[in-house]
Image (cartoon, rainbow, N blue to C red):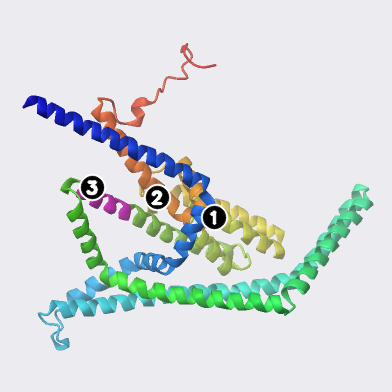
Amino acid sequence: MEDGIVKEKLQDRTFRLALNLFLGGSGILLFYFFIKYFHTVMAGVRAFGGILFPFILGGIIAYLLCPIYNVTVRHFYRHAQKWRFLGFSRVKRRALICARVIGSFVALVVLFAVLAGAIALIVPQLIKSIVAIFSILPGRIDDLTQEVNILAQKAGHPEAAATIDEFIRKGIAAATKFVEEKLLPINGNSVVKITEGIVATARLLLNILVSIIVSVYLLNGKEKLKANFKRIILARFSRENAEEIFSFGTFCNRTFGGFINGKIIDSIIIGILCYFLMLLLHLPYAALISTIVGVTNVIPFFGPFIGAIPSAVLICVISPLKALYFLIMILGLQQFDGNILGPKILGGSTGLASFWVMFAIIVGGGLFGIPGMVLGVPTFAIITYYFDRNTGKRLRFRGYKEKTDDYIDFNVYDADRKDILK
């Protein structure tokens, strides 16, 4: 009997070892082919993402509107049962249906109000700035040429002034030629490009419309969708593994929700502060540039600089000195956001060190562009959290200490240490 049990355990251990070797070898082969055909794989992922774009965007919209929807539904549902003249007395189902309709309506009103406000704020300012650039830029170029000539004459190098002047003139001529030959003519190629642009715009608008419809479906059906997922997981996994999956989902929701909602609130505050500071300093295009700074601030770490560089160039056309004031202001605003406002709002939503935040942004941006830069930080935070937890379990199982601080040698730089590498 005991020999049979031992043989059974040995067979089970052999099977697990073979399975681990097979899975490990398959993982190595998949990783190899992924690296070898990286561009092909990413092209396929982008094509598949383009097909799923309305559903992905709809999910993002629903996720962002979910707090507004939940508050509205909860508030209206609580009061709707008391309104007997509407026929909702003692009929919870009708009250819930009506509350969901009101919640969807309020969420969509907020969405369209934000979009309309952003368009009304950005488009007029953008048109105004473009017109101002084209009206002021020639004069600024002439002033720059004169300043260069004066400096060259004072330095005793008049030939340098002539060379720089010729370089500027050639640059202006090339830009004018490009506009006249590539942008203005309406030839066959231009007509095709315009048609393609119209079709792409129509497709984008259709995708946005479908995304809004999808978001409404997700908002109203999220409880049933969650129940179905829970039912499937409980049916196919053990209770312990199912609890782990539920815990993982809760942690992901808390991490992504805390980070994204926190960054949105943080960016709105930074945009408002930027607007009032620009008004205080009498800087041009306050509304447009504050909107750019607020939107790009959603990107961690690099966001303020991404928004500040084109904004500074825009202000520089009006006044280089004001552009310098703007850059100093943005630097101070970024320090305030990174050291005071951001930690207060975000708190410990990610728990990542600054180095890993930068690493996640660069890798995420390199793989998936701007969405990768925004979502790279919470994604990497989830990966590091579970990797660290698994490492801690293994160390505890083997009788070692779990915390990283227990492995740091704080005396490594002592003067009397003989084992330090020189």
Give the residue at mark 1: 304
Which of these two is toward me, 410 or 376?
376
Give the residue at mark 3: 244
Which mark, residue 269? none
> What are the residue bounds of the magenta stretch?
242-254
Image position of 290 with respect to 194: above or below: above
- Give amino acid for label 3: Glu
Residue at 39%, 41% (x, y): give it. Answer: 27
Question: Horizontal placement of 143 versus 112: left or right?
Answer: right
Pointer 3 with pointer 1, Cβ within 8 A: no
Question: Horizontal placement of 66 versus 3: left or right?
Answer: right
Give the residue at mark 2: 379
State the quadrant of the N terminus.
Answer: top left
How far is mark 3 from mark 2, CA to CA? 18 Å
Q: Position of residue 224 (x, y in %)?
A: 22, 67
Number of other residues with Cα within 10 Å of mark 3, as a class: few under 14, some 14 to 19, many 20 or more: few
